[in-house]
Image: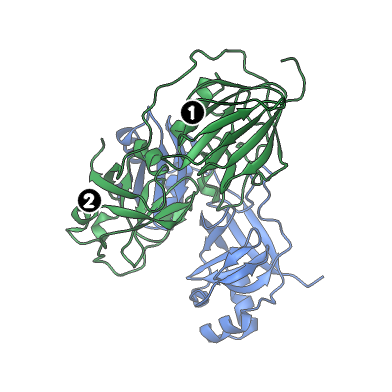
Amino acid sequence: MSPRFRRCGDRAVLVELGGAAEVLALYDTLSADPPPGVTDILPAARTLLVRFEPPAHRGTVEAAVLNARPSRGRSAGTGEVTVPVVYDGADLADVAALTGLSEREVVTAHTGTPWTVAFSGFAPGFAYLIGGHPRLRVPRRSESRVRVPAGAVALAAGFSAVYPRESPGGWRLIGRTELTVWDVHADPPALLRPGMRVRFAEARDG
Amino acid sequence: MGEAVRLLEVVATGPLASVQDLGRPGRGDLGVGRSGAADRGALRLANRLLANPETAAALEVTLGGLAVRAHGDLLVALSGAPCPATVTDASGRARGIGHHAVERLPDGATLRLGVPGSGLRTYLAVRGGLEVPEVLGSRATDIMAGLGPELPRPGTLLPVGPPPDRFPGVDLAPVAEPGEDAPVLGVLPGPRDDWFGADALRVLCSAPYEVTADSNRVGMRLRGPVLERVRGEELPPEGMVPGALQVPPSGQPTLFLADHPVTGGYPVIAVVCSRDVDRAAQVRPGQRIRFRLGAR
């Protein structure tokens, strides 16, 4: 699909694309060589938001998007991370009931496919992972928890995520990891960045 | 002034005071918002008055009430919402100081801010800037993301950086006060105006919206004409900008400010022009705003 431009105030253009793969490909290309004046390149589910400051303007940004050629060998966000998970989450039984799988089958499905970081949001370092087993598509909880611990591994709306820090949250918790996915003193501070591949592996407690 | 330690000691904060600079751009893809001063122009001006870099950190004070004591001789400037400001020196002599002006705050003196007569956010900049530790390249406190320095409390000591080589060039900057009864903010349609009825943009600009008490650095919840959606499906999350008018199912828009979420899931009918976002940040709860299509 050719990109469709949607105006987003006088300092940003929202580029609408065909899906996550196109978004990530354009994100890769633009962030490898950002046009002058571009300050933020923000992938989301079906869109890429490009924020800019003068001297950049709508025209230069749109031209850069139209001229972007998919980069060979992905530059930004390449790499693969394995996330060890203890599958003892408070909502594991609910997820099994909602999907018609056994708890063991939920674990097998979650570890059985590679996921990809599509975008971040909600909180610093909170990565929305796509590409999981289609049976794992479950809705958010009807009520948000006040406190979800850091490292909680969760599912909602076809995405999976690891909570980077303790926060409120409405996703369904299936397990936890000891891996630090957010560290403000690290550079980059987020372990899971758009375009990265993520594999979940079952870990034994302790 | 020598090399003596220079600090600003917080004595009282008022309803909310936070350290802000121009924020941390360029990390939206990691879920990190820009944050920074809600009225960026006011912060820049206070810094320019002191010949600081525009990026220096200062205090953003909501509805006045701040009191600070100088440790070492300091030069300060106030900008944004104008409030009565008094300096009491170490011997107890008090004098009023001006707004948008370069003022001395000698060692041991206390500066107290009253409640602004108009506007919401006052900036107190210090020559040399506030040198609290940076987090991800910025000294801004992002209230929503929980990034940056902790909010100052009585007793907090804020280190002041070395004065820049340049000297202040003017004593006073003439600036119009944010006193309009119902300020008019320019908006540009989109990105999701097509999710609303054909009439919705006209409705948005037809009557004033009241800024409700449910407003902070993240955004301002507005109350006014209801914006009817014509598309009922869920919008997948997409990137947000300051000034975005996001419309939840209630049809009452929220105007995003500095600490807005990086991505949002409600459609944005229109975006306030960047130059008017600063003016929006000076509107108090209970006050009204109007929207007008097009840049001013």
Give x and y (percent) for residue B266.
Answer: 37, 61
Residue A3 visible from this viewpoint: no
Going 26% across and 37% down the picture, which residue do you hit?
A: B295
Chain B pictured colour: green
Q: Quadrant of the N terminus of chain B?
A: top right
Q: Secondary structure at mark 2?
A: loop
Label 2 packing within 10 angstroms: few (<14), some (14-19), many (20+)? some
Which sits in the foreground, B266 or B67?
A: B67
Tell me the distance, in whole angstroms, between the alpha carbons under discs 2 and 1. 30 Å
Residue B183 visible from this viewpoint: yes
> In terms of image quadrants, where is residue B19?
top right
Question: Considering only vertical position in the picture, is B42 above or below A65?
Answer: above
**Is residue B207 shown left or right of residue A67?**
left
Residue type for callout 2: Cys
Going 44% across and 32% down the picture, which residue do you hit?
A: B41
- Residue indicated by mark 1: B44
Mark 2 and mark 1 on one chain: yes
Question: Considering only vertical position in the picture, is A104 above or below A160?
Answer: below
Residue type for callout 1: Arg
Q: Which label number is shown at residue A49?
A: none
- Residue indicated by mark 2: B205
**Is residue B120 shown left or right of residue B251?**
right
Q: Secondary structure at mark 1?
A: helix
Furthest toward the right, the residue is: A206
Which sits in the foreground, A85 or B47?
A: B47
Give x and y (percent) for residue A23.
Answer: 42, 51
Disc 1: which chain?
Answer: B
Which circle's residue, 2 or 1, is located before the other in the chain? 1
Q: Which chain is blue?
A: A
Which sits in the foreground, A175 or B250?
A: B250
Q: Quadrant of the C terminus of chain B?
A: top left
